C-alpha cells in the first residue's frame, strides 16, 4: 500500500465536528465534475490510492477513469463496502426486483438470483455474503482494486453479534475472486485484532481511528498503543486530525512516530490542503518520499 491514501468523506457531507461544513461540502460535490477535479488534484500531487465507499457517485467516477485509461493508469481504488443507503434508495426507486437487477454482477441476473435464492433456501450465509460483495464490486470492473475493505458499520456489528466467520468468508472471497487483499475498518481495533487472530487471518490490513487525543478510539488509547507496539498487522490510521481538533503539523508528526502504521488516510477538498498534508507526511515519514513522489 501507498503511505498516503485519499478518502472520500468530504464528497458526501461527512464531518464529525461541523454540521455546517458538512452541508456545504455535500452541496459542492453534488456535481461529479467537482469530485473529479479534487481527485485530479490529489493524483497530480502524487497520491494514487483512493479509499472510497460504493456510493452511486463513485460509480460515475469509475466510468470517468475507465474512459481515460492513460490519464489514470496508476490510479488505485480501494472500495469500502457496503454502502447501506444505496440499497434502501434503490428499493424505494425501483422496487425489489429492479434493485436486484441494478446491483447484480455481470455473470447474469438469473445466475446471481439463483445463487441468492438457493442461499436463502439453505440459509447459506456464505452464498448471500459473496453475492453482496460481487454486487458492490460491479462498478469497479476493469479498474485496479488492490485492497477491498469491509466497512466499520458491518465489522463492528458482526463483532457485537459474535458472527466471526463472516470475516473469513469476506477475506477468502476477496482473495479468490478479485485477487485483492481484504481490509477491515473498525471503531474498536483491539477487539477486532483478537477475532482476526482467532480466525487465522494473518497480518491483516486494519483501518481505525488513530490520533493523538484518542478521538473515537473505542477500546481505550492505551489498548491501541499496545496493539501498535505488540501485534502483527498492517495499520491504516484515519481521523488523524481528529476532525480538526489537532493542528495538522502536530497530528502528522505524532502519527508518523507511532510503530507499525503502514498508511494514513485523509480527506481534503482543496489542492493546497492536499499538498500540505503530503508535504507533512514526507517531512515526518522520510521513506514515503519515493513511494508518493509526484
Image: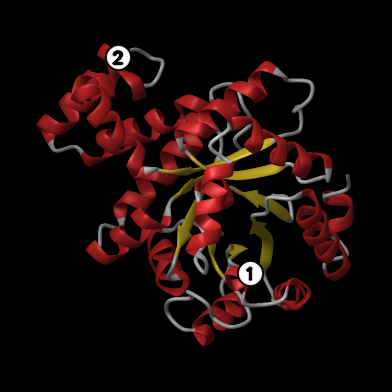
Instruction: Give the x, y percent position of residue 147.
Output: 57, 43
Q: Are marks 2 and 1 in contact (CB under 8 Å)?
A: no
Q: Nearer the viewer, residue 5 or 30?
A: 30
Task: Name the residue located 54 percent from the left edge and 23 percent from the top edge.
Answer: 141
Q: Which residue is mark 1?
A: 240
Q: How many marks?
A: 2
Is 250 displayed left or right of 157 in the figure? right
State the residue in front, 125 or 52: 52
| Pair 2/1: label in front | 1
**Residue extending farthest bottom:** 222
Q: Helix or strand or loop: what does disc 1 sit on?
A: loop
Q: Which residue is mark 2?
A: 109
Please tell me which residue lies in front, 63 or 131: 63
- Residue sitting nearer the eye, 47 or 17: 17
Rendered location of residue 122, percent (x, y): 12, 33
Q: Is residue 100 above or below residue 289?
A: above
State whether residue 204 is above or below residue 177.
below
Q: SS of the residue at dot 2? A: helix
Seen in the image, is 272 located left or right of residue 14? right
Q: Image point 67% across, 67% down: which residue?
A: 261
Q: CA distance from mark 2 to mark 1?
A: 42 Å
Residue drawn at x 27%, y 66% is: 160
In the rendered image, which quarter contains the C terminus? top right
Q: With 215 as the anchor, is 68 left or right in this view?
A: right
Is 145 above or below relative to 243?
A: above
Using the rendered image of the protein, determine whether residue 206 is visible from the camera's viewpoint: no
Q: Is residue 111 visible?
A: yes
Amino acid at each position: 500500500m501507498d503511505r498516503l491514501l485519499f478518502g472520500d468523506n468530504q464528497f458526501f457531507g461527512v464531518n464529525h465536528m461541523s454540521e455546517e461544513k458538512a452541508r456545504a461540502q455535500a452541496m459542492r460535490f453534488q456535481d461529479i465534475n467537482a469530485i473529479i477535479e479534487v481527485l485530479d488534484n490529489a493524483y497530480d500531487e502524487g497520491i494514487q490510492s483512493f479509499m472510497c465507499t460504493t456510493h452511486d457517485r463513485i460509480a460515475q467516477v469509475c466510468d470517468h477513469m475507465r474512459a481515460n485509461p492513460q490519464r489514470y493508469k496508476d490510479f488505485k481504488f480501494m472500495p469500502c463496502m457496503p454502502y447501506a443507503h444505496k440499497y434502501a434508495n434503490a428499493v424505494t426507486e425501483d422496487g425489489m426486483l429492479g434493485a436486484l437487477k441494478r446491483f447484480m454482477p455481470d455473470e447474469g441476473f438469473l445466475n446471481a438470483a439463483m445463487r441468492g435464492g438457493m442461499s436463502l433456501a439453505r440459509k447459506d450465509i456464505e452464498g448471500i455474503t459473496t453475492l453482496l460483495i460481487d454486487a458492490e464490486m460491479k462498478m469497479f470492473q476493469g479498474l485496479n482494486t488492490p485492497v477491498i475493505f469491509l466497512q466499520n458499520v458491518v465489522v463492528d456489528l458482526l463483532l457485537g453479534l459474535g458472527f466471526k466467520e463472516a470475516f473469513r468468508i469476506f477475506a477468502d472471497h476477496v482473495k479468490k475472486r478479485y485477487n485483492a487483499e481484504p481490509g477491515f475498518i473498525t471503531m474498536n481495533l483491539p477487539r477486532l485484532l483478537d477475532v482476526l487472530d482467532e480466525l487465522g487471518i494473518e497480518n491483516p490490513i486494519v483501518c481505525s481511528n488513530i490520533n493523538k487525543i484518542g478521538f473515537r478510539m473505542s477500546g481505550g488509547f492505551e489498548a491501541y498503543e499496545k496493539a501498535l507496539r505488540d501485534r502483527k498487522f498492517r495499520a491504516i490510521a484515519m481521523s488523524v486530525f481528529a476532525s480538526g481538533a489537532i493542528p495538522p503539523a502536530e497530528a502528522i508528526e505524532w502519527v508518523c512516530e507511532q510503530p507499525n502504521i503502514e498508511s494514513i488516510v485523509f480527506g481534503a477538498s482543496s489542492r493546497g490542503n492536499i499538498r500540505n498534508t503530503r508535504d507533512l507526511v514526507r517531512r515526518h515519514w522520510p521513506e514515503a518520499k519515493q513511494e508518493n513522489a509526484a
